[in-house]
Image (tube, rainbow, N blue to C red):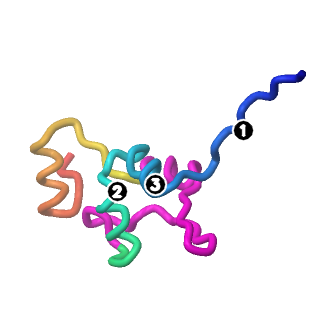
């Protein structure tokens, strides 16, 4: 009997997607209604019937678009002024 490798998951459930990007499931659930996740546009999702799925490549792209900071002062300035002071 031939043993096949498991299929690589390319679409995540809401719970899996939330874990992948480091937020709680309820925040991701709410972002689909409000269109906002911590002041940012949330990652895109797919609706298949009653099921919600997130593509891994969309989650990676969303993470890549997020502002990175070297310290908390920089992060607070970004939040307050909307731009990196450096």
Judge whether 41 appears above or below 7 on screen. below
Q: Position of residue 26 (x, y in %)?
A: 30, 61
Earlier sequence position, callout 1 versus callout 2: 1
Q: Evaluate if marks 3 and 2 touch, with contact meaning CB atoms under 8 Å apart.
A: no
Q: Position of residue 71 (x, y in %)?
A: 16, 37
Q: Is residue 81 left or right of residue 29?
A: left
SS label for mark 3 = helix
SS at badge 2: helix
**The one of 9 and 37 positioned closer to us in this rendering:** 9
Q: Is residue 50 part of the magenta span, yes or no?
A: yes
Q: Which residue is mark 1?
A: 7
Question: How far separated are the C-alphas under marks 3 and 2?
Answer: 16 Å
Q: Is residue 36 left or right of residue 71?
A: right
Q: Which residue range is magenta in the image? A: 36-64
Q: Distance between the Cα atoms at labels 1 and 2?
A: 24 Å
Res 25 label: 2
Tags 3 and 1 touching, CB below 8 Å: no
- At label 1, counting other C-alpha atoms closer than 10 Å, the crowd grade (few under 14, some 14-19, many 20 or more) is few
Q: Which is more N-terminal, label 2 or label 3? A: 2
Above or below residue 13? Residue 30 is below
Q: Is residue 47 left or right of residue 69?
A: right
Q: Dot 1 lies on which element? A: loop
Residue identified by numbered label 3: 62
* Residue found at x 40% / y 72%: 32
* Residue pictured at 76% horizontal, 28% vertical: 5
Q: CA distance from mark 3 to mark 1?
A: 24 Å
* Quadrant assignment, res 20: top left
Residue at x-position 53% and y-position 65%: 52
In percent of width and height, residue 10 lies at 64, 47
User: Which residue occupies 21% across, 46% down?
Assistant: 86
In the foreground, 84 or 55: 55
Q: Quadrant of the N terminus?
A: top right
């Amino acid at each position: 009997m031939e043993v096949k490798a498991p299929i690589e998951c390319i679409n995540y459930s809401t719970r899996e997607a939330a874990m992948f990007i480091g937020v709680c499931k309820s925040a991701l659930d709410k972002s689909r209604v409000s269109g906002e996740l911590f002041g940012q546009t949330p990652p895109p999702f797919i609706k298949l019937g009653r099921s919600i799925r997130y593509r891994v490549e969309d989650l990676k792209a969303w993470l890549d678009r997020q502002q990175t900071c070297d310290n908390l002062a920089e992060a607070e300035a970004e939040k307050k002024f909307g731009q990196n002071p450096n």
